[in-house]
Amino acid sequence: GQNIDQPTEMTATEGAIVQINCTYQTSGFNGLFWYQQHAGEAPTFLSYNVLDGLEEKGRFSSFLSRSKGYSYLLLKELQMKDSASYLCAVVDSNYQLIWGAGTKLIIKP
Amino acid sequence: TAGITQAPTSQILAAGRSMTLRCTQDMRHNAMYWYRQDLGLGLRLIHYSNTAGTTGKGEVPDGYSVSRANTDDFPLTLASAVPSQTSVYFCASSDSIAGGPDTQYFGPGTRLTVL
C-alpha cells in the first residue's frame, strides 16, 4: 500500500527553527510537494522537490532523499503567522498526489 | 483574478437528499480535482478530470459523480447523501494535460454536514 507519515503536531518558539519530517512508501515517485494550510482555509503551495537535495526559498527550505523515502521542511525565523498545518504529498506512478495527514505546527511567543 | 471559487461555503443536508457542489476556475487549467478532507486523514481524491470531456475515479469515488462539460466548471454531485459524507470538500486545478506533477491550486472549500 501507499503510506505517507508525518508527525501529528509540533510546537516551536517564535524566532526559532523547526524541521517537519515526512517519510513515504508509494508505488512510484514523481516528486514531492509541501503545502501550508491555515485553519479553515485552503492548502497553498510551498515547494516541490523531484531531485535529491535542498531547495531554499526564503525562510522555508525543503529537502529530499529519494533513496531513503524521506523529506523535510525547514522553517527558519519562525513567526506567529507560521502557525498552520503543513501537508506532505507524493506524486505516485499514476501522477496522482498521495497526501499525508499533515503536521499541525503551533508557534508560541 | 478569482482563481478557483466554490459554492456553497457551507451546507447542512438531510440524509437521502441530493446536492451539487459547484467549482469554477478562471485560470484555464486543464486538470481539475475534487478532494475530501477529514480530521486526522490526508486529503483523499474523489474524482478528477485531466481535460474537458473526461473524468476519472480517485481513491474514494463511491456515492459521488462529476461532469466536465467545459474547461472552467467541475461540479460534484451527491445523489443520496449519507452521514459519512460529512466533510470539507476542496476543489483544485492544475495546468496539466497528462496528470503530471504540476502544482495544484485549491478553492476555499465547502463544509458539508449530513444529518
Image: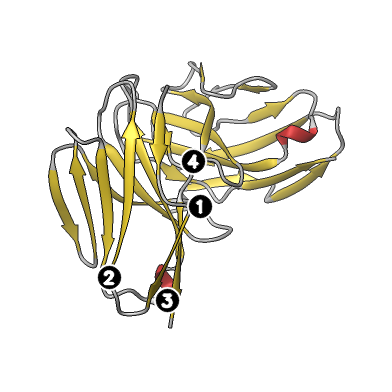
The chain that hosts pointer 1 is A
Q: Could you tell whether A15 is left or right of B83 in the image?
A: left
Q: Is mark 3 on a helix, strand or loop?
A: helix
Find numbered disc 2 in the image and state the secondary structure of the residue it sits on: loop
Q: Which mark is residue A17?
A: 2
Residue at 51%, 39% in the rendered image: B43
Q: Disc 3 marks which amino acid? A: Met
Residue A72, image x and y in percent?
Answer: 27, 51
Residue pointed to by mark 3: A80
Measure the C-alpha gap from mark 4 to mark 3.
31 Å
Neighbour class for label 1 at 10 Å: few (<14), some, many (≥20)?
some
Residue placed under numbered mark 4 in the picture: B25
Q: In this view, does A10 lie to the left or right of A59?
A: right
Viewer-proximal residue among B25 and B96: B96
Q: Are marks 1 and 2 on the same chain?
A: yes
Between B32 and B83, the one nearer to me in the picture = B83
The residue shown at (69%, 27%) is B77
Which residue is under mark 1? A42
Q: Between marks 2 and 4, how big is the CA–CA gap?
A: 36 Å
Q: Is mark 1 on a helix, strand or loop?
A: loop
Q: In this view, does B93 lie above or below A6?
A: above
